[in-house]
């Protein structure tokens, strides 16, 4: 069972905006990093949404569920948390 992972995310306030941004990324019209820099409300957006490496339980429960069970290299979301709506890409897990 994986204990550490790295991921990046994009935070926005509404689900429709989140879906719009996901379409931009999955269609190849923009990269995850570009979309994060231009749209994310989280300070990590300046680094393309990079959250770095972290262990289980260090992020909110909704993140943990996706990061430690979802497919690596795929854009997941929208994921609703107390902060808003997120797109999440797992970049590594071990």
Image (cartoon, helix red, strand yellow):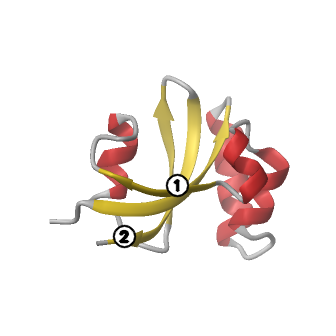
What is the C-alpha distance between the residues marked 1 and 2?
A: 11 Å
**Above or below, comparing residue 89 to residue 13 in the picture:** below
| Residue 12: quarter of image | top right
Taking the view exactly as shown, the residue that stands out farthest to the top is 82
The x and y percentages for residue 74 are: 49, 70
The answer to whether the residues at label 1 and label 2 have Cβ atoms under 8 Å apart is no
- Residue in front for this viewpoint, 90 or 20: 90
Residue hosting label 2: 71
Q: Which residue is found at the position 73% from the left and 36% from the top?
A: 41
Q: Quadrant where the N terminus lies?
A: bottom left
Residue at far left of view: 1
Q: Quadrant of the C terminus?
A: bottom left
- Residue visible at 50% across and 60% down in the picture: 7
How far across and down, in percent of the image, does residue 38 sit? 85, 51
The answer to which quarter of the image holds residue 67 is bottom left
| Left or right: 63, with 30 as reference point | left
**Rendered location of residue 19, percent (x, y):** 64, 49
Along the horizontal axis of the image, is 57 left or right of 40? left
- Tag of residue 88: 1
Position of residue 89 in the picture relative to residue 63 (left or right): right
Q: Earlier in the sequence, mark 1 or mark 2?
A: 2
Residue 61, above or below 53: above
Residue lying furthest right: 38
Q: Answer yes or no: is residue 69 visible.
A: no
Which residue shows up at 74% across the image and 76% down it?
Answer: 28
Along the viewing direction, whichever of 61 and 80 lies nearer the viewer: 61
Identify the secondary structure beneath mark 2.
Answer: loop
Q: Residues within 10 Å of mark 2 (few under 14, many from 20)?
A: some
What is the number of the mark on residue 52? Answer: none
Assign a secondary structure to mark 1.
strand
Rate crowding at label 1 as few (under 14), some (14 to 19) or many (20 or more) other CA atoms within 10 Å: many
Q: Nearer the viewer, residue 84 or 55?
A: 55
């Amino acid at each position: 069972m994986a204990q550490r992972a790295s991921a990046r995310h994009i935070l926005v306030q509404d689900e429709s905006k989140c879906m719009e941004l996901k379409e931009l990324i999955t269609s190849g019209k923009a990269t995850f990093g570009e979309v994060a820099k231009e749209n994310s409300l989280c300070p990590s957006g300046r680094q393309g949404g990079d959250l770095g490496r972290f262990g289980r339980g260090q992020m909110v429960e909704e993140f943990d569920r996706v990061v430690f069970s979802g497919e690596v290299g795929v854009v997941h979301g929208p994921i609703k948390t107390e902060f808003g709506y997120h797109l999440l890409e797992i970049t590594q897990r071990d």
